[in-house]
C-alpha cells in the first residue's frame, strides 16, 4: 500500500472510531491482530473436533439431525447426560473396522516404501545436477502436483483398464496374450498413491540432499571408500531426516485416502477413509462415522508427533 | 562408464516417464474422435465442443471458481496474519496453540476435516441458526481453513528470511505499527503472498472430499461432478477437461515460478 493510502486509512473516521472503542475496552491492536487468526482456527479447526467427539458418543436416530442429543431434560426438571461408548464398542466388535485400519496401514507402508525407492534416486540425481538443469527437473517434479489430483487418478483408470493403454501396448508387442487385470486391485491403489504423492517424497529428500556437505563425501573418497561404500555409509545416514520427512508426507495422507481406493481399488480394497465415507454417505450413521474418525485421529497423530520431534531435534542441531 | 554411471540416469528417466506418461496419454486421447478413450479413432476436437455444451460441468466450474477465489483471498489474509503474529510478536498467550492449529490442517486426513466441519455446521445451525443450510458459504469456510494453513507456512518462511532492519528503520523514523506493516513488510513479502494465494486457489479447486461433506444441494463443485462422472467409467469429455486444466496450470505455475524467483532475490 502506498504511504498516502495508508495515511488515509489510519486517518479515516471508521478507523479512528474503531481504534477509540477498542482502546476504551482495554484491547490493544496487538491483541486484535492475534485474535483474528486465533478465533478463525479455534472455531473452524479445533471446535469441530469437540463436536466430533461429542457426536461419537451419541446414537444414530432417524431424525434431523440424525443423532441423539447429549443431554435431555427429564420430566422432573433434571438434566440427564446421555453418552455412551457403544459406538467404540461396536468398532471393536466388528472385524471390518480393525481390518480396515490394519489394511490402511499396510497399504500406506507399502506405498511409502515404493515412493522412497522411486523418489530417492530422482532426488539424488536432481540435487547433484548443475544449474539450470536442476531447477528445470525440480519444476518437472512439482508440476504434476499442481494439476488436478482427481484427474491424475483418472488418468490411471485409462492406463490400467482391461482395454487400457498398458494392456493394449503389451498385447500389441505380444508380451501377453490376454489382458491383465490391474484396475480394481490393491496393485492399482499402490500405483495411485505412489504416483500422486511422489512429489511429496522427492521435495524434502531434495532439500536435504542439496544441503549435504560435499566435504564429507570427499573425505570418504580420500580414505579409499568406493562410491557405493560412500553412499551407504555417508550419504544415506546423513539424508535420514529427509527420508523421514518425505515418508511421513506420503504415509499420512495415504492412510486416510478415500479417492484412490474408491476409483482404482476393488470392492474388497479396505481403507479406513473409505469406510468412514461409506458409513457417512451410505449408511448415514453419523455417530459411527464420528467414532471411526476419532480412532483414525489417534492413528495419524502419533506419526505426526514423531515427525515434529525429529524436525525439532534437527533444528536444534 | 561405471555401472553406477548409467543406472542412476536411467532410473531417473523411468521416474519421469512414470510421472508424465499418464498425463500425456490424457492429453492425447482428449483429441481422439472415438468414444473408446484408449483406442485411437482419428484427430478431433469434438469432446471440447461437448464439454462446452455440458451445463452441469460449466455450472460446477463456476461454483468452483467462486469458491476458490473467495477462499484463497480470505485464506491469504488469515494465513498472513497468523504468520505475522508467529514471527513478529514474540511470546504471547496461546502461541503454541496457534502454531499447532495453523500447521495441523496440513496433515489432517481430508475425511476427518470434512466430517468434523460438517458436524460443526449442523450444530451451529441448530444452536445459532447460522449457517442456514449448507452450500457455497460452508464450502468457502472449509476451504479457507485448510488453505490458510498453507499460506501461513509460505508467509512464515518469507517473514523469517526477510531483513528485519527495514522494519526497525521505519519504526526509528517514527512509523506506527500499521504503517510499518503496510508500507514496509507487506511490499517485501507480497510476491510470496501471491504464490501463497495461487497455491490456495489450486488446492481449493482440487478438493473433492471436504467439499463433498460440507456442500449442499445446488453447490456442487467441479471435482464433485467430475467424480460422479468418472465413477461410472472413463469418458472422453473428462479428458478434454483435464487437458484444459493442465494447460491453465502450466501457465499459472510458470507465472508463480517467475514471481518466486523475483522474491527470492535479495
Image (cartoon, coloured by chain):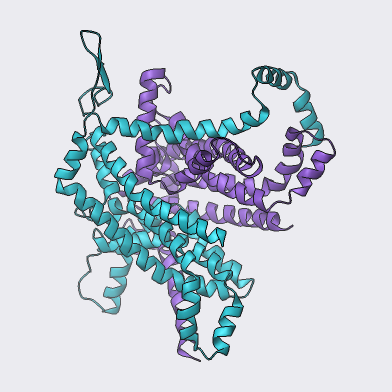
* Percent x, y of residue A288: 23, 36
User: Going by the picture, which residue comes out furthest to the top?
Assistant: A76
Looking at the image, residue B193 lies above or below residue A8: below
Looking at the image, residue B59 lies above or below residue B14: above
Name the residue nearer the viewer: B71 or A127: A127
Q: Which chain is cyan?
A: A
Tell whether B26 sits left or right of A284.
right
Q: Within the image, what quadrant is residue A265 found in?
A: bottom left
Q: Within the image, what quadrant is residue B45 found in?
A: bottom left
Residue at image position (41%, 70%) is A118
Looking at the image, residue A269 lies above or below residue B221: below
Residue at image position (43%, 44%) is B207
Residue at image position (59%, 74%) is A213
Name the residue nearer the viewer: A188 or A213: A213
| Quadrant of the rendering where the C terminus of chain B is positioned | bottom right
* Percent x, y of residue A6: 77, 32
Q: Which chain is purple?
A: B
Amino acid at each position: 500500500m502506498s504511504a498516502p493510502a495508508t495515511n488515509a486509512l489510519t486517518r479515516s473516521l471508521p478507523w479512528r472510531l474503531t481504534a477509540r472503542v477498542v482502546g476504551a475496552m482495554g484491547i490493544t491492536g496487538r491483541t486484535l491482530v492475534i485474535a483474528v487468526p486465533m478465533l478463525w482456527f479455534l472455531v473452524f479447526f479445533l471446535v469441530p473436533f469437540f463436536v466430533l467427539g461429542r457426536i461419537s458418543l451419541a446414537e444414530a436416530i432417524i431424525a434431523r439431525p440424525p443423532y441423539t442429543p447429549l443431554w435431555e431434560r427429564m420430566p422432573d426438571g433434571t438434566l440427564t447426560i446421555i453418552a455412551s461408548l457403544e459406538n467404540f464398542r461396536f468398532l471393536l466388535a466388528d472385524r471390518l473396522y480393525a481390518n480396515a485400519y490394519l489394511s490402511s496401514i499396510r497399504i500406506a507402508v507399502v506405498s511409502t516404501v515404493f515412493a522412497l525407492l522411486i523418489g530417492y534416486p530422482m532426488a539424488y540425481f536432481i540435487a547433484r545436477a548443475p544449474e539450470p538443469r536442476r531447477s528445470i527437473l525440480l519444476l518437472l517434479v512439482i508440476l504434476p502436483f499442481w494439476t488436478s489430483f482427481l484427474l491424475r487418478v483418472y488418468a490411471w483408470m485409462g492406463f490400467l483398464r482391461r482395454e487400457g493403454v498398458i494392456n493394449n501396448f503389451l498385447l500389441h508387442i505380444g508380451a501377453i496374450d490376454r489382458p491383465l487385470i490391474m484396475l480394481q486391485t490393491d496393485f492399482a491403489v499402490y500405483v495411485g498413491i505412489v504416483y500422486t504423492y511422489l512429489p511429496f517424497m522427492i521435495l524434502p529428500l531434495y532439500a536435504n540432499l542439496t544441503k549435504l556437505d560435499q566435504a564429507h563425501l570427499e573425505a570418504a573418497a580420500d580414505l579409499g571408500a568406493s562410491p557405493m561404500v560412500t553412499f551407504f555409509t555417508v550419504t544415506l545416514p546423513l539424508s535420514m531426516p529427509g527420508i523421514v520427512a518425505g515418508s511421513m508426507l506420503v504415509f499420512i495422507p495415504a492412510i486416510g485416502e478415500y479417492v484412490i481406493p474408491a476409483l482404482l481399488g476393488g470392492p474388497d480394497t479396505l481403507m479406513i477413509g473409505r469406510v468412514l465415507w461409506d458409513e457417512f454417505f451410505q449408511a448415514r450413521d453419523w455417530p459411527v462415522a464420528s467414532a471411526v474418525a476419532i480412532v483414525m485421529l489417534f492413528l495419524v497423530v502419533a506419526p505426526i508427533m514423531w515427525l515434529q520431534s525429529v524436525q525439532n531435534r534437527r533444528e536444534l542441531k | 562408464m561405471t555401472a553406477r554411471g548409467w543406472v542412476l540416469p536411467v532410473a531417473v528417466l523411468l521416474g519421469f516417464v512414470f510421472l508424465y506418461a499418464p498425463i500425456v496419454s490424457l492429453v492425447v486421447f482428449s483429441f481422439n474422435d472415438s468414444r473408446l478413450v484408449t483406442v485411437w479413432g482419428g484427430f478431433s476436437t469434438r469432446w471440447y465442443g461437448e464439454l462446452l455444451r455440458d451445463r452441469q460441468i460449466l455450472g460446477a466450474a463456476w461454483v468452483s471458481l467462486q469458491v476458490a477465489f473467495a477462499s484463497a483471498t480470505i485464506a491469504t489474509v488469515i494465513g498472513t496474519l497468523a504468520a505475522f503474529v508467529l514471527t513478529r510478536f514474540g511470546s504471547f498467550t496461546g502461541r503454541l496453540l496457534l502454531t499447532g492449529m495453523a500447521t495441523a490442517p496440513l496433515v489432517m486426513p481430508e475425511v476427518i476435516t470434512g466430517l468434523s466441519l460438517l458436524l460443526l455446521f449442523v450444530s451451529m445451525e441448530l444452536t445459532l441458526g447460522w449457517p442456514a443450510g449448507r452450500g457455497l458459504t460452508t464450502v468457502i469456510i472449509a476451504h479457507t481453513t485448510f488453505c490458510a494453513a498453507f499460506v501461513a507456512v509460505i508467509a512464515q518462511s518469507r517473514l523469517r528470511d526477510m531483513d528485519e532492519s527495514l522494519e526497525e528503520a521505519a519504526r526509528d523514523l517514527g512509523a506506527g505499527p500499521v504503517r510499518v506493516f503496510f508500507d514496509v513488510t507487506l511490499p517485501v513479502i507480497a510476491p510470496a503472498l501471491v504464490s501463497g494465494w495461487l497455491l490456495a486457489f489450486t488446492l481449493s479447486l482440487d478438493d473433492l472430499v471436504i467439499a463433498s461433506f460440507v456442500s449442499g444441494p445446488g453447490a456442487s463443485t467441479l471435482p464433485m461432478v467430475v467424480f460422479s462422472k468418472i465413477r461410472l467409467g472413463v469418458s472422453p469429455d473428462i479428458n478434454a477437461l483435464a487437458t484444459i486444466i493442465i494447460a491453465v496450470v502450466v501457465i499459472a505455475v510458470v507465472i508463480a515460478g517467475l514471481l518466486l524467483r523475483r522474491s527470492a532475490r535479495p
